[in-house]
Image (spheres, grey):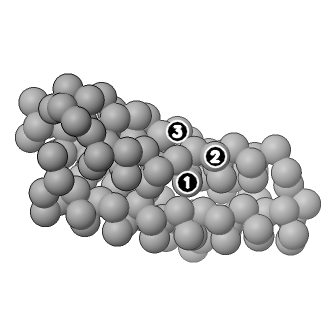
Amino acid sequence: MAGGSENIILQKTFSFAVRIVKLNWFLIEKKKEFVLAKQVLRSGTSIGANAEEAIASRSRKEFIAKFGVVYSEAKETKYWLRLLKETELIDEKMFLSLLDDCEEIIKIVFKIIESSK
C-alpha cells in the first residue's frame, strides 16, 4: 500500500516524534511538568508509530483505518500543544513551530485517507 506521500508522511512523523521527545525532556527537566509532558509524548510519538503500521497494512480497509488512528493522534497532539501554550509551559515561538509541523501532518494524513477511499 506504500506510495510517495506515505514515504513523506513517515519522514515527517518521525521528525515530529523526535521534536516531541525533546519537548517532553524540556517539560520534565526545565518546567517540572510531568502529566502534560507524558500526554503529549504519548500522542505525539504514536503518530509516527501508527503511520509505520499503516504502511505495513495488508488491505486497503486496514490502511485507511490505521491512518484514521494517525489522524486522531495528530489532532490530540494539537490539543495538548494548545494547552501547553495557554498554560505558558511553552512559549509562542515553540508552540507555532510545533503546531505548524502538526498541522502539516494532519493535512497530509487527511489527503492520504481521502485518496485511499
Image location of residue 11, percent across then percent down:
34, 68
Residue corresponding to mark 2: 42
* Residue at screen point 86% across, 71% down: 30
Q: CA distance from mark 3 to mark 1?
A: 11 Å
Image location of residue 100, percent across then percent down:
41, 63
Q: Position of 16 compared to 111: left or right?
A: right
Closest to the observer, 97 or 53: 53
- Residue 36, compared with residue 22, is above or below; it is above
* Residue at screen point 57% across, 70% down: 19
Instruction: Name the front one of labels 2 and 3.
Output: 2
- Residue 88 is drawn in which quadrant? bottom right
Q: Earlier in the sequence, mark 3 or mark 1?
A: 1
Image location of residue 2, percent across then percent down:
17, 53
Disc 3 element: helix
Disc 2 element: helix
- Residue 24, compared with residue 61, is above or below; it is below
* Dot 2 alpha-carbon crowd within 10 angstroms: few under 14, some 14 to 19, many 20 or more: some
Image location of residue 20, percent across then percent down:
60, 63
Closest to the observer, 65 or 40: 65
Disc 1 element: helix
Q: On residue 76, which mark appears? A: 3
Residue corresponding to mark 1: 45
Q: Position of 74 compared to 6: left or right?
A: right
Closest to the observer, 46 or 104: 46
